[in-house]
Amino acid sequence: MDKASKIINMEQLPISGAGGTNTPERIRVLIEQEIAEGRLPPGMPLDEKALAARFGVSRTPIREALLMLAARKLVVTVPRSGTFVYKPGAAELIALLECLGELEGVAARLAAQRMSAGQREALSAIHATATVQARDKLREAYEASNLALHQLIYAGSGNAFVCDAIKEARLKLAQFRRNVFDQPGRLQISCAEHEPIVQAICAGDGDGAARAMRDHIIGKGKAFADLVLANAS
């Protein structure tokens, strides 16, 4: 698909939740959401005129929103070429995943130390539901439970800085991780890897929870790395 075609498609994208004032911050949030959802894929050009038409604003708030996204390395401006959704290379993607593994390990350790009894019960319930979904190969339902399980661990960590760092790393990896569950047996493997995480957190074993979480992310990372390297070849 050439650049012009991509820009036309971008103009035709619906504006998700676009009610209210189109401030630069609001536009930034909506563009970020579309990047995370894959509607603005890595490498796609972001034309200021087309975006201004979509949001019904001048180019000024569009430029400000793109500057905010560029500061977080979600978009990149290439001199004399334009602004594009950032597309990291294979080495950077794998490095990001390694960073995510360490951050999630910290969150799991803290969750084991800080989660309330109610949160531990909810974690066990989510895992039990996910186990059935994985067994029955209900991918969409399992993905929702998988996300809920990890988000509960983040909340249970009680550390907003760690949670923000995890969110940022996950956002940058979202486009590239969404196909990991396409690999045969990955649902069941993912669910089995959750078992020692949940057990350790519920037992208050911080070191065990961190170790199991890192093993989980590294395990998924192997599947992810295989995808990245295959696409790069």
Image (tube, rainbow, N blue to C red):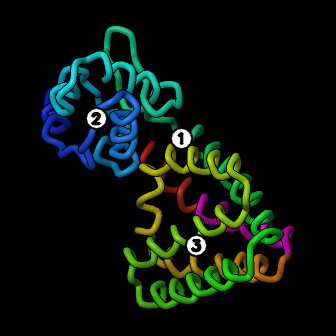
Q: Quadrant of residue 144?
A: bottom left
Residue indicated by mark 1:
90
Q: Nearer the viewer, mark 2 or mark 1?
A: 2
What residue range appears in magenta?
205-221
> Viewer-nearest of labels 1 and 3?
3
- The disc labelled 3 sits on which kind of residue? Leu
Q: Residue at x 15, y 34 (%)?
A: 11
Amino acid type of the residue tagged 1 in the rendering: Ala
Q: Main secondary structure of the magenta part?
A: helix
Q: CA distance from mark 2 to mark 1?
A: 38 Å
Please tell me whether mark 3 or mark 2 is closer to you in this view.
2
* 89 in magenta: no
Residue 51 locus on image (x, y percent): 22, 28
Which class describes the residues within 10 Å of circle 1: few (<14), some (14-19), or many (20+)? Answer: some
> Is the C-beta separation of discs 1 and 3 under 8 Å?
no
Asked if residue 219 is among those painted magenta in the image, a careful observer would answer yes
**Residue 74: x %, y % from top left:** 46, 34
Name the residue carrying label 3.
149
Numbered disc 2: secondary structure: loop
Q: Relative to 204, is 173 above or below?
A: above
Spatial CA span between label 1 and label 3: 28 Å
Q: Label 2, on which residue?
A: 21
Residue occupying the point 15% across, 38% down: 9
Name above or below for residue 127 compared with residue 102. below
The disc, 3 or 2, on the residue closer to the chain's N-terminal end is 2
Amino acid identity at mark 2:
Thr
Secondary structure of the residue carrying numbered label 3: helix
Q: Residue furthest front?
A: 20
Real-space Cα distance between discs 3 and 2? 34 Å
